[in-house]
Image: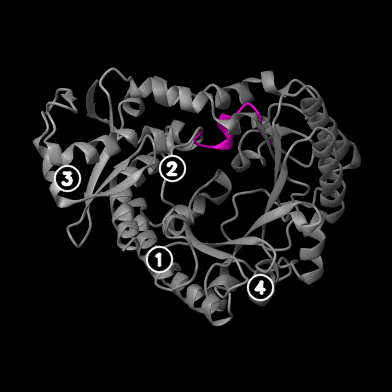
């Protein structure tokens, strides 16, 4: 059988001049001994090679191993078609991803918030409609699992909705033999030991909490609704939650605050967040105009290429903490995906407190972008179909890109908006950031 190098291979050299191969289609990464690197370079260029006749004896076993890991592929294999098959067969496509916003109210007044704040709470009839919709899909065997993301507003202001919907969805899952998991994005101010235990009983596994810097920075960008500091309450929430959940600590930064991200790491270390028995995973995110509500943030947004430099430096500092964090997770080492975002999936939806269904959490404050009420024919609405039917394989730039398996065209919201500063974020990320991230990962592997 004739072989050729995969068109999705990336060769990198780390700072010690060690050679690694990374394959974007499989996510496999392997270190290449110097002698094997020479054998690879000696193979015929631009044509297929025969393992028995074109590879020197000392390289046959190693090249065969690389072929098994798909760094070399059958010359007849259409790798783009293989990616399409992988995407279509992805198990995530049959998981119901339900983002529930039980309230649009919030007890903070973040200066860069992208939503329109109001105290609207989800009513009983809407809760019933959500539960009925899941029951219908489960009974019809349209889904193989249920994943709930609690969002807001501040979801913990709506404890009654969380309790009722969670308990009844867990019953639906048990009745139909479906796995159930839940996660939450919260500002953390209402998380204490009692709240954590309450949430443990409802299948919660992960929470994201935002801590924007040292006290003076955080309290400037995330003050309480009535004024005053939220810093201590957020830190207490992180400590309480990290004993029972995986806690993602999001540090939002702009040109004025990015230096403070390192102070957050030091504070988290000092209070024991990285000790055994806790699960705390910090990362930085860019403050910017995610919607028209926060367009004023353009003035202090970090340029995307500069932001990725900060990301690399921050990740390296996290790795140097000496914690038990997985380097691949810290570095967000990419893996082949079956969707760029939940919005690509037929079975992914956001439910506003009014019961209106959206595809993107960044648009829930815009009723004109809704696809109709939960329980209705929202899946047929143009505002729903345009997300599901977006096909990166129809984009010549994407379909010819070696990073396609890792990003599938990037964010489906901003990739269609040439005026957004996030328009080509995925392209820049993979073209400029992936190789340094892989080199940093290689340095952690000995």
Q: Which of these two is toward me, 214 or 111?
A: 214
In magenta, the rendered stretch is 339-349
Q: Residue at x 18, y 23 (%)?
A: 48
Q: Is residue 156 visible?
A: yes
Q: Earlier in the sequence, mark 1 or mark 3?
A: 3
Q: What is the distance, in whole Å, between disc 1 and disc 3 at their CAs?
A: 34 Å
Secondary structure under the numbered disc 4 in the rendered image: helix
Q: Which of these two is toward me, 426 or 275?
A: 275
Secondary structure under the numbered disc 2 in the rendered image: loop
- On the image, the x and y values in percent for residue 71 come to 29, 35
Q: What is the distance, in whole Å, between disc 2 and disc 4 at their CAs?
A: 30 Å
Q: Residue at x 16, y 45 (%)?
A: 36
- On the image, the x and y values in percent for residue 338 come to 50, 32
Q: Nearer the viewer, mark 1 or mark 2?
A: 2
Q: Earlier in the sequence, mark 2 or mark 3?
A: 3
Q: Which residue is mark 4?
A: 239
Q: Nearer the viewer, mark 2 or mark 4?
A: 2
Q: Is residue 151 visible?
A: no
Q: Height in image: 271 above or below 41? A: below
Q: What is the distance, in whole Å, between disc 3 and disc 4 at their CAs?
A: 49 Å
Q: Which mark is residue 36?
A: 3
Q: Height in image: 108 above or below 99? A: below
Q: Which mark is residue 314?
A: 1
Q: Earlier in the sequence, mark 2 or mark 4?
A: 4
Q: Which residue is mark 2?
A: 335
Q: Which mark is residue 168?
A: none
Q: Residue furthest front?
A: 57
Q: Earlier in the sequence, mark 4 or mark 1?
A: 4
Q: Earlier in the sequence, mark 3 or mark 4?
A: 3
Q: How is the image coloured?
A: one colour
State if disc 4 and disc 3 touch (CB < 8 Å): no
């Amino acid at each position: 059988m004739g072989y050729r190098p995969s068109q999705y291979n990336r060769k990198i050299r780390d700072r010690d001049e060690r050679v690694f191969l990374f394959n974007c289609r499989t996510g496999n990464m392997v270190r290449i001994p110097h002698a094997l690197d020479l054998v690879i370079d000696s193979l015929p260029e631009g044509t297929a090679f025969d393992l028995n006749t074109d590879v020197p004896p000392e390289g046959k076993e190693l090249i065969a191993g690389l072929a098994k890991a798909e760094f070399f592929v059958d010359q007849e294999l259409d790798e783009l078609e293989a990616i399409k098959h992988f995407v279509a067969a992805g198990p995530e496509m049959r998981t119901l991803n339900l983002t529930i916003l039980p309230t649009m109210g919030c007890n903070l007044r973040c200066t860069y918030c992208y939503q329109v704040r109001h105290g609207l709470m989800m009513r009983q009839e809407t809760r019933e409609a959500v539960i009925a919709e899941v029951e219908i899909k489960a009974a019809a065997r349209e889904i193989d699992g249920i994943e709930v993301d609690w969002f807001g507003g501040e979801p913990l202001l709506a404890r009654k909705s969380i309790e009722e919907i969670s308990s009844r969805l867990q019953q639906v899952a048990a009745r139909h033999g479906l796995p159930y998991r839940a996660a939450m994005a919260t500002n953390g101010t209402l998380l204490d030991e009692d709240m954590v235990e309450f949430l443990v009983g409802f299948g919660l596994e992960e929470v994201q909490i935002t801590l924007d810097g040292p006290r003076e920075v955080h309290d400037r960008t995330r003050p309480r609704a009535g004024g005053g500091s939220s810093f201590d309450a957020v830190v207490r929430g992180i400590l309480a939650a990290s004993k029972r959940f995986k806690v993602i600590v999001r540090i939002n930064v702009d040109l004025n605050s990015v230096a403070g991200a390192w102070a957050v790491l030091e504070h988290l270390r000092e209070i024991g967040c990285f000790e055994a028995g806790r699960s705390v995973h910090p990362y930085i995110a860019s403050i910017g105009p995610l919607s028209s509500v926060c367009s004023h943030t353009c003035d202090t947004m970090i340029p995307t290429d500069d932001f990725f430099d900060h990301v690399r430096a921050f990740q390296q500092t996290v790795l140097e903490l000496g914690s038990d964090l997985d380097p691949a997770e810290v570095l967000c080492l990419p893996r082949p995906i079956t969707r760029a975002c939940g919005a690509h999936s037929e079975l992914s939806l956001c439910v506003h407190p009014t019961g209106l269904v959206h595809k993107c959490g960044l648009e829930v404050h815009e009723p004109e972008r809704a696809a109709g009420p939960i329980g209705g024919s929202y899946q047929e609405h143009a505002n729903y179909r345009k997300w599901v039917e977006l096909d990166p394989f129809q984009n010549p730039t994407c379909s010819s890109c070696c990073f396609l398996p890792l990003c599938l065209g990037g964010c489906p919201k901003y990739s269609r908006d040439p005026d957004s500063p996030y328009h080509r974020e995925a392209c820049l990320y993979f073209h400029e950031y992936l190789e340094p991230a892989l080199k940093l990962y290689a340095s952690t592997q000995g």
